[in-house]
Amino acid sequence: MNALLTDLYQLTMAAGYYEAGKTKERATFELFVRRLPYNRNYYLACGIEQAVDYLLNLRFTSEEVDWLRKQPQFTRVSPGFFDSLLDFRFTGDVFAVREGTPVFAGEPILTIRAPIIEAQIPETYLLATIGFQSSIATKASRIAETAAGRSVVEFGTRRAHSPHAGLLAGRAAYIGGCTGTSNVECSHRFGIPMFGTSAHSWVMSFSSERVAFEQLQALLGDATVYLIDSYDTLQGARTAAEIGKPMWGVRLDSGDLIELSRKVRQILDDAGYRDAKIMATGDLNEYRILELSAASAPIDVYGVGTDLATSADAPSMGAVYKMVELEVEGIKRYTAKYSDKKATRPGSKQVFRYSDHDMIGCSWECPSCPEGSRPCEALLRPTIIGGQLVEPLPDIHAARTHASASLARLPKAIKSLYAPEDAPWQVVYSEEMKKLEERVKRNYGAGR
């Protein structure tokens, strides 16, 4: 795993910790979102698998260490620090929510407890992979919700911010509720169903639309999807119907999708192809799909690209990674920051999910549940202990199932595309957490 895929200050701080003799201090960091965007009522936690894989395989090569030695920021650093990088391994503990878990502002998605250098260096990578994938999984869940049971396919690699971002977007979108992806590597690597049709260039490369359709059918058989809007959409539908089976269906990529889908459906039905499907693509998002669903447009599958792979309306999750505890020679000190609008709460936390709210408490708490109610669930689970994976992580299909089941238990208002008129999902703090925060704040004031 490329250890240099990080911000410079992670490594300068690591060198500084080494020079200050802090290598045996154990720090606890939490990764969470301070506040939700105005158009998000929750986030789906995603990217845990990549985060865990990174930590288990984080290494510095001798070439990387030699290069760091020569950089001007490290000219005052002792040779021993660079030697320590050659032996670097993550030996700490990780507690994380399951992939696909809905989370809310202030709730830790992942907690790391490790020697301070081991806990500091991973910050950049963890924020990047969890922040990005959680944004895409959340966007996908919103789109799937508005599709009202119709399939949604992720088509966004060509619009993603890099090919690797497209790969992870396909993974996250599947966990969030998409049926599959157009990304071949994503299907190969993660076992996600793969979908694809043909481009307008295919149709235009032949002497006529009919010839292009016939050649496509000869190639794909039952998997044939005719792209019918290269010239005249309704004539394209008639041509597809005249050629007939084998085919999966047709794709609409432009125009008035409500009116066109109705007319195309009629053409296919009149020709006896009631089982032929209609796929719609072309700058779709959850708001457009909501309109199509509300109009009962006879569309069976939505292909969503740019808006999904970039989470266009909320492209940044705003996740942060903050120290909450520091243990020095067996003595624990709780840490927090009090800067305006960026304050944090001290102490390692646990999130307890009840049937109608969440409670953020201290990690050592074991709260009681109201008599007769369903037991609350502790969301943060031991994932890595002492640098070793506790048990295999759930695969991507299990994560997708977990996301679907978890979202189904949330109130419908929380899954609205808009801010709910009534109170959003309530997140409260335990009395123990409030007391700890007050004690730390008093000590902070006394020590100034």
Image: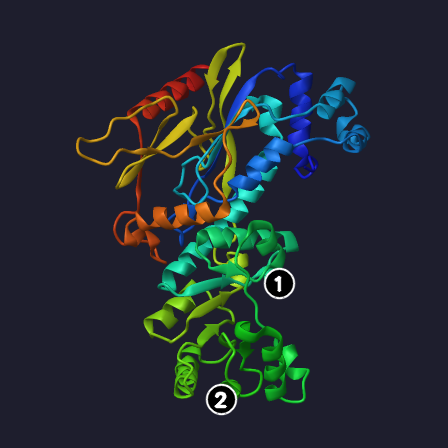
Q: Earlier in the sequence, mark 1 or mark 2?
A: 1
Res 317 seen here: no
Task: Answer above or below: position of 202 versus 189.
Answer: below
> Foreground mark, 1 or 2?
2
Q: Quadrant of residue 429?
A: top left
In x, y percent, where is residue 371? 17, 31
Query: Which amino acid lies under the numbered mark 1 shown in the image of this protein?
Result: Arg
In the picture, the disc for residue 158 is: 1
- For the point 35% across and 48% down, which residue is it? 405
Q: Residues within 10 Å of mark 2 (few under 14, many from 20)?
A: some
Left or right of 272, for residue 85: right
Res 87 seen here: yes
In x, y percent, where is residue 210? 59, 88
Residue that numbered label 2 is attached to: 238
The N terminus appears in which quarter of the rendering? top right
- For the point 53% across and 73% down, which residue is it? 222
